[in-house]
Image: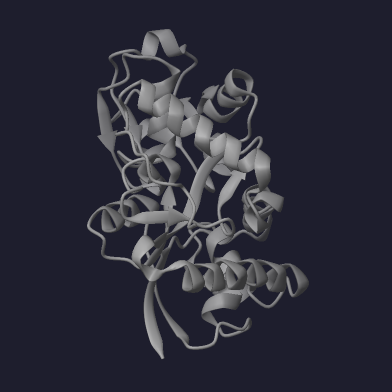
Amino acid sequence: MQQLSLGYSPCPNDTFIFYGLVHGKVPCPGIKFNQQLEDVETLNQLALKKQLDLTKISYHALGHLRENYVLLRSGGALGRGCGPLVIAAQETSMAKLRGKRIAIPGQLTTANLLLQLYSAGYENLLILPFDKIMAAVEQGLVDAGVIIHESRFTYQQYGLKQILDLGQWWEQESGYPIPLGGILAKRDLGRQLIQQIDTALRQSIEYAYAHPQEPQSYIKQHAQELDNDVINNHIELYVNDFSLDLGEEGVQAVNSLLSRAEKRGLIPPCELPLFIK
């Protein structure tokens, strides 16, 4: 039995996606997955240290990981209307936020990459766990924050204002859906094993769709927000056809994001193929 370390976040979309895989609901003979649930920026950093065989990462982090990891076609978060939001306690503008203190959910998050791609002048950053950002903005510890995950659905409860939808900006700028997070496998696992895992991951998503009530207790065990509507909205927004398979449009979106980041010097160039050959 080959044991593989598998990292993903405790967010509802990931626990929904991976439920079938880690609970033996789909066939993946000869493999035991040792799951490790962490905040996405922690996963980004663990992957930088090559400590995980398989892991969810931010697409920003992928730009720094391509020498050692390949991208899987299933399991990721990519779509429209699901990007990070810049929020503040009072109405303001992005121009007025240049040079101000902005909380982000991680240096290598796609949220931060989009903020940097939007324009220069947003380098005064405070890195916080994603679920601590709204409170930091509310308490005046920062001038603004970039929020992700369930926070998209709850920030108004804190009396906070949306300043910019970075995902909407990206969609208008590029014409593509926004690549948020993907699933990586170490290149040295080899083509056959990686393809087997990719297939099993797609089957895990299909299983969760076919048995939507079954993963609920597992999802709630790890979710930051326990409200059923928030959880269901989260899954509906971040798990979609691109999660089953990136497809041509999804691959183009990823390549566009990485290309733009390379041109801005935000990630290093890499000639290796994105997927296993």
Choose between 233 and 195: the one closer to the eye. Answer: 195
Q: What residue appears at the point 53 percent right and 38 percent down from the top-left corner?
A: 254
Percent across and percent down for residue 118 are 45, 19
Left or right, 262 with respect to 253, comes to left
Q: How is the image coloured?
A: one colour
Q: Would you say residue 139 is visible in this rendering?
A: no
Percent across and percent down for residue 276 are 48, 57
Q: What residue appears at the point 32 percent right and 33 percent down from the top-left corner?
A: 267
Left or right, 94 with respect to 75, comes to left
Q: Would you say residue 212 is visible in this rendering?
A: yes
237 vs 270: above or below: below
Q: Quadrant for residue 265, please give it.
A: top left
Which quadrant is home to the N terminus?
Answer: bottom left
Choose between 157 and 276: the one closer to the eye. Answer: 276
Q: What residue appears at the point 65 percent right and 24 percent down from the top-left corner?
A: 175
165 vs 202: above or below: above
Q: Residue furthest right?
A: 210
Percent across and percent down for residue 93 are 47, 11
Q: Quadrant for residue 25, please give it.
A: bottom right
Q: Residue furthest front?
A: 277
Q: Residue furthest bottom?
A: 1
181 vs 96: above or below: below
Q: Residue furthest left?
A: 49
How many marks do you count on the picture? 0
Percent across and percent down for residue 45 are 27, 52
